[in-house]
Amino acid sequence: MKWLSWLLLAARLTAPGEAAELILDFGPPDTDAPPPGFTSVLVGEGAPGRWRAVREATPDATNQVVLAQLSADVKDEHFPVLVYAGAVFDDFTLTTRFKIVDGVAEQMAGVVFRYQDEKSFYVVRASVLGQNLRFYKVVGGLRSPPIGPNLPLAKEVWYTLRVQCQKNKIRIWLNDQPVIPELTDTSFASGKIGFWTKSDSLSRFAETRIEYTPRASRVQAILGNTLDKYPRLVGLKIYAPDAVGIPRIVASKAAGEVGQAGGDSETGAIRDGAVFYGKDKRTVAVIQPLRDRNGEPIAAIRVIMKSFPGQTEQAILQRALPIVRHVQKQVLSPDDLQ
């Protein structure tokens, strides 16, 4: 079973267009594995990055869980990147703390944003050895000339980096001071966010917050076009399992229900592929699995319709069938549910 992960340490559910805030959780510390919900990517050559959650003091806490890059590959064109897989962002403000611990060939740390893949993204990074902060973009594997000032930077010092993207405008601050004049670039309108280092740089990242404008999710669009096609439905809900396997509503005709936990029927539909139905005097409900391309249940759908006297179980299932099929055609992988 392929589960969806909900990786927000703190997130406020909002309607599309409203401001939201997300605080990244790097997971349990001192585990010999990358943080869950992130994808380790190597740009260039050499060994993959070694990203781990560790405990370390920050300016605000003596025992904080921080993200550490521990690989020490000295190759020059070696850029370990750790990408947050949970969302794609349009307009946002990213704030993070970073500290450069050591490195022989390089001592750098930075962030990637509007990341498309390992060959296309924006990056801003700080260098202790170079005593500078630079912005550049990579498009199709080709790197632009770097832009940015020379700055006094030191090892073992925490700095605050803030990046803001609004449409085609990019603004960058270090320790709350603007360090690069406002940039205008149209290469990428949206993308993912991640952490960046170079060569053998040993770096730390902490207290990462993203303020953003939520996008209309694909699952919301699927639910919306289903309700347009079947406007007489009393209710329609789609459930996906959270990080511990509890089915939660990811889209509903009643928007305020998003995030609520499902029950045994939704659990059984996702876990076992089972079908359930129930009825009362006014409504009938059918709960069925939604399956990925390989036929594995990845979600559950609850279809709620008006009840009619004398209606049999078979008739109820037949009424729900075209609705379930309409949704199933559009849900082929867990990505469609995020």
Image: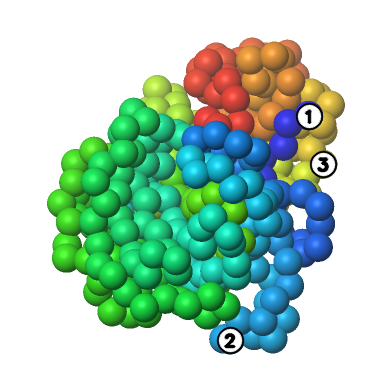
Residue 29 in the image: above or below residue 317:
below
Residue under numbered circle 1 = 1
**Considering the image in quadrants, where does the C terminus appear?**
top right
**N-terminal of the two: label 3 or label 2?**
2
Q: Is residue 284 above or below residue 78?
A: above
Q: Locate the N terminus by quadrant.
A: top right
Residue 158 spot, x, y in % from top left:
52, 78
Where disc 1 sits, the SS reads: loop
Secondary structure state at the residue bearing disc 2: loop
Q: Amino acid at mark 3?
A: Asp
Q: Which mark is residue 264?
A: 3
Residue 174, quarter of the rendered image: bottom left
Q: Is residue 2 visible?
A: yes
Spatial distance from mark 3 to mark 2, Cα to Cα? 42 Å
Closer to the camera, 265 or 234? 265
Describe the element under mark 3 as helix, strand or loop. helix
Q: As displayed, is residue 213 above or below residue 138?
A: below
| Number of other residues with Cα within 10 Å of mark 2, as a class: few under 14, some 14 to 19, many 20 or more | few
Q: CA distance from mark 2 to mark 1?
A: 40 Å
Crowding near pointer 3: few (<14 within 10 Å), some, many (20+)? Answer: few
Q: Amino acid at mark 2?
A: Asp
Q: Residue at x 28, y 79 (%)?
A: 177
Please give the label number shown on residue 60: 2
